[in-house]
Amino acid sequence: MTSSYQLNQTDHLLHVLFNEQQKSLHISNAAITSIAAQLNLPRAQVESVVDFYSFFHRTPRGRFDILFSNCTSCGDLKLMQQLCERLQVKPDNTRADGLVSIGQTSCIGMCDHGVSLLVNGITLTSISAQQIDHMAELIEAETALAQWPASWFKVGNNIRKEGLLLASSFEPGGALKAMAGRDGAAIIDEITAAGLKGRGGAGFATGMKWKFCREAQGDTRYVVCNADEGEPGTFKDRILLNSHADTVFEGMTICGSVIGAKQGYLYLRGEYRYMLAALENTLQQRREKGLLGSNILGLGFDFDIHIVIGAGAYICGEESALIESIEEKPGIPRIRPPFPVTQGLWGQPTVVNNVETLVAAARIVLHGHHWFVSSGTWQSRGSKLLSVSGDCARPGIYEYGFGITINEILNDAGAEHVQAVQIGGPAGRLIPADHFEHRIAFEDLATGGSFMIFDHSRDLLEVIHNFARFFAHESCGFCTPCRVGTTLLKNGMDKICSGHGTAHDVDEMNRTAALVSRRSHCGLGMTAPNPIRDGVKYFPELFEARLLHQEMEPEFNLDASLEEARNLTHRDDEEAHL
Amino acid sequence: MPKVRVATTSLAGCFGCHMSFLDMDERIVGLLEHVEFSRSPINDIKHCEPCDIGLIEGALCNADNVHVLKEFRENCKILIAVGACAINGGVPAMRNNFTLAECLEEAFLDEIGVDNPQIPNDVEIPLLLSKVHPIHEVVKVDYYLPGCPPPADAFVKILTDLLEGKEPSLPKDMLHYD
Ligand SMILES: Cc1cc2nc3c(=O)[nH]c(=O)nc-3n(C[C@H](O)[C@H](O)[C@H](O)COP(=O)(O)O)c2cc1C
Ligand code: SF4
Ligand code: SF4
């Protein structure tokens, strides 16, 4: 696969399919055949990719294809319903005249902006009910997106609190210059001394990851920046990519020089496509300044970066699924070991790091580890960017030294009457009010940065229900415990929330939850039952209040399920009912 | 000591599970020293009396299946879902990919060679459910005996465990199908 080493970004299957989807509003069988021929890929591979990613469709979408976020922070499906009614179109259907299709999608990372959506892949934020009416008119009149009010497309940074990373300014090339005279091993020592751990969720020691990769056998090596940021409630990588892209790319470049990579990839979630042009521009400027390309700053190493854009699949944030996706395949997690540090992209040693990790690494190289350890706790060095959203006066980005308590954060965010906080997104933990003295730190509450606040006006069961739907939708389907289990858990929540659940159903959900966590192949399945388990543990009274007090209630309405047969046979006798 | 009463039935199934049950051959003689049968296709008793153990083969596809299943649940202390159909819907649930109207029209109206095409509507014929369901969606099931059909050894094992007052558990080779 040597040719793939130079994978050209305009030829990347995901990009070619995106263009085809935009142009033809769907991807036809004929298109699959011709794309397979054009890219010299097996047809089955192209087909499986089309079917895997939720932004690709086999049947035509509307000329305006609208996806509402269904996240508890940046979504409100009542507005989707409103737009559907205004435009006379059913959710997930394309209107007969082909003008518009409306559907929902998982969190699009705009949680600090209120209700948000994607139109033909481009982000619109802070949508109100009045705007929906206006939008319906614009769509009916087939007004081009360029003529829609520019303010609708505005994505702010909402930085509320700056710490170690956000407060200091950064000169492009600064950290690379600080590398002069230090070899790769010295850089790794610096990062290790700083105690930097991965910011993407798993918290693996970054210095060690780079060291393993540097020492692994391979023909070449790769650096991958994980900008998939799919965990509902997380948007801190968005801010870093928007305002600190130079630092992100510099972190990748430093990693490249340390491990001996010539090529890096930024894997950007499809929902952040609106940032693509700016990011490409930054890359170009860096090339012009000699910060990318050959013999960077005369330091004697070559490195460049390509951007690969996802197409709506949360699982592609999992590092091995992400690697598969860069390799133009469905994002199905690999069996590990081997880990990416020994066999990653195209089988070569690969470092996958989160955006924030790479920013921190660049800063550590620039300022030294003493600077970094001035913040944080003994086991959790440095700072963490938190994406705060939900029921509070001041949603946005808060950068704190590790060790901050939940109470302090809620106070800063202006949150009152808080019922619970979801830390680390649906895959993380649901924390009840009597645990708010706990701290954000690897040794207490580890998090990728999602911090969702739910006050007493929220129906917490509906929140848990929403998370259960999220996992059932995002399960990649590769392994049975997760594929079947997440749907069973969702069905259980459907039943309880609709008032048909019994204690027996809660027991069954607990059993299923334990099985899904223990037997799933990757982190998605292992964490998918968390919201239900935490809910049952900390808020049993909420479940109890919805339950029917009887041994068992059928999963479906027995009499209603005879309706179709009654109609077909024109029967209505006693035996025709249950 | 009074014998343990066992009832069995086939809902939407192929009787394959019952055949496999009988495949225990002469071991059934030993079993009968401890067990007597209530309602079962083996003895043609039509209604289930209060029992210790009920074995259900087959899925739920019509109203009669639902009545029979409920009768079993009300009368059996322990209810066991036997085979793929009872546990998951199995082969009968393949019709769930179609609407009921499509199924009936294909069978009674459109199929080649049908004369006097009409959808049967005699009150004696139980109405079909719009979809086929596994039995645990309607009643509480205590144990599951997987397989299509489960091997005779698995029937022997689960019944022996229950007779000995143990929590039934099947060895891995009785749970492995590929
Ligand atoms: C289902 C799933 C989704 C993930 N999503 C992300 C993500 O969006 N961004 C991210 O950086 N890491 C994500 N991760 C963690 C990555 O697998 C990986 O641990 C991380 O990118 C490593 O970088 P770090 O060491 O810098 O944290 C996800 C993991 C799982 C299991
Ligand atoms: S746990 Fe879920 S997401 Fe992970 S491999 Fe299995 S099916 Fe896919
Ligand atoms: S599980 Fe298999 S053997 Fe048993 S009734 Fe169903 S189809 Fe027949």
Image (spheres, coloured by chain):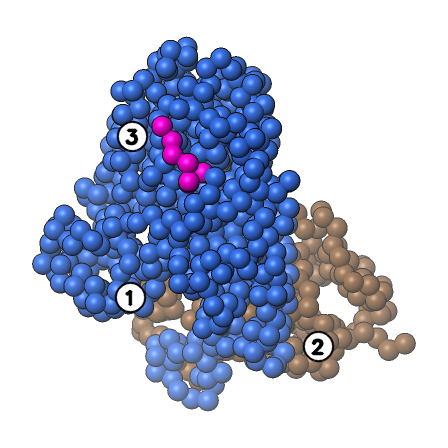
Chain colours: A blue, B brown
Which residue: 73% across, 60% down?
Answer: B155
Local packing at callout 1 (Cα closer than 10 Å; few below 14, some 14-19, many 20+) is many
Q: Position of residue A205 (x, y in %)?
A: 59, 33
> Quadrant location of residue A35?
top left
Q: Determine if residue A524 is in view.
A: no
Q: Nearer the viewer, residue A151 or A21?
A: A151
Q: Magenta segment range?
A: A165-171
Q: Position of residue B146 (x, y in %)?
A: 64, 57
Q: Position of residue A453 (x, y in %)?
A: 47, 61
Residue type marked 1? Leu
Residue type marked 3? Thr
Residue type marked 2? Cys
Asked whether mark 1 lies closer than 8 Å to ligand 1, one says no
What chain does badge 1 belong to?
A
Q: Residue furthest right?
A: B1
Q: Which residue is mark 2?
A: B76
Instruction: In the rendered structure, find residue A282 and report the number of the disc placed on it.
Output: 3
What chain does badge 2 belong to?
B
Which residue: 63% across, 54% down?
Answer: A515
Question: In front of the other: label 1 or label 3?
Answer: 3
Q: Secondary structure at mark 3?
A: helix
Q: Which residue is mark 1?
A: A79
Q: CA distance from mark 1 to mark 3?
A: 36 Å
Please tell me whether residue B59 is drawn above or below residue A377 in the rendered image.
below
Instruction: Left or right? Give the position of A158 relative to A385.
Output: left
Which part of the image, by quadrant, shows the N terminus of chain A?
top left
Q: Secondary structure at mark 1?
A: helix
The answer to which of marks 1 and 3 sits earlier in the sequence is 1
